[in-house]
Amino acid sequence: MIFGFNTDVKHEDTVYHVQSEARENELLLQTQVFVRGRCIGKRATSYADKAAQGGFTDQQKEQVLRDQHRLVLDTIREGRLDSVLDKRDTPETLAAIKELDVQWLNADSVHAERNLIMRLRVTDGGSGVQGARLTFRFARPDKAPFYTQVVTDASGHAEMKLEMEESSLSDSSVLVQASYSGRTATRKFRLRKVEAQP
């Protein structure tokens, strides 16, 4: 059973996106924290020992993950997020986990000539992934959500292009899910109209 939690929480002027999921392949319950689509830290609990002993149910996993998710949300609200993040995220440990990740490459310039263009890269343990399927869900005010899909090229890059007026970008958000080799990574990006400089 796959389950997870996604919550946006604001502290001062920063909106944090907190995503928790059970990583069955690694026997980890992981919570990641994102700011503007970039992962700024994570907290993970291994349940390998409990799984080896048997009797660690999906309900128990979900409860541990729910408690961990709530802990991270509470520390953000209290302004002490660093106190609960794992300190062992060296390049070596990240590569060992083989983490699927989605990066938004052109966050500063997404609208041109009546088109919304999102350029993304999917990586696995830091290396580009060919053939990852990206599913986009656009949530727009006063309109039904819109879905589309693209597949990454040999270097892990993909481009999604959609005809859209720039004025409709404000208050819109995009949920992107990357699927590859039986694993998924989900990111939420908020779109906004860039104010013209005087």
Image (cartoon, rainbow, N blue to C red):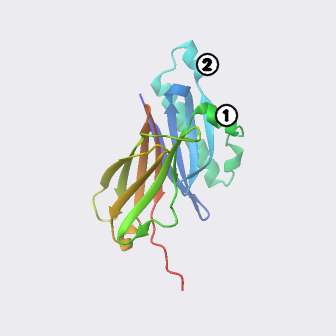
Residue 2 on image: x %, y %: 43, 31
Mark 2 vs mark 1, foreground winner is: 1
Establish if 72 lies above or below 63: below
Viewer-side residue, 32 vs 115: 115
Residue at the bottom extreme of this rendering: 198
Residue 136 on image: x %, y %: 37, 51
- Measured Cα–Cα span from mark 2 to mark 1: 19 Å
Q: Which of the image's four quarters has the C terminus?
A: bottom right
- Residue at image x 61%, y 35%? 44
Left or right: where does residue 149 sit relative to residue 157?
Answer: left
Which amino acid type corresponds to the residue marked 1 in the rendered image? Answer: Thr
- Residue at image x 68%, y 42%? 84
Which amino acid type corresponds to the residue marked 2 in the rendered image? Answer: Asp
Viewer-side residue, 66 vs 42: 42
Instruction: Please tell me whether mark 2 sits on a helix, a strand or a loop.
Output: helix
Residue at the top extreme of this rendering: 53
Are the residues at dot 2 and dot 1 in contact (C-beta closer than 8 Å)? no
Q: Which residue is mark 1?
A: 93
Residue 38 on image: x %, y %: 57, 52
- Residue at image x 51%, y 31%? 23
Q: How many marks?
A: 2
Residue 121 on image: x %, y %: 50, 49
Viewer-side residue, 190 vs 124: 124
Q: Which of marks 1 and 2 precedes in the sequence?
A: 2
Q: Which residue is mark 2?
A: 49
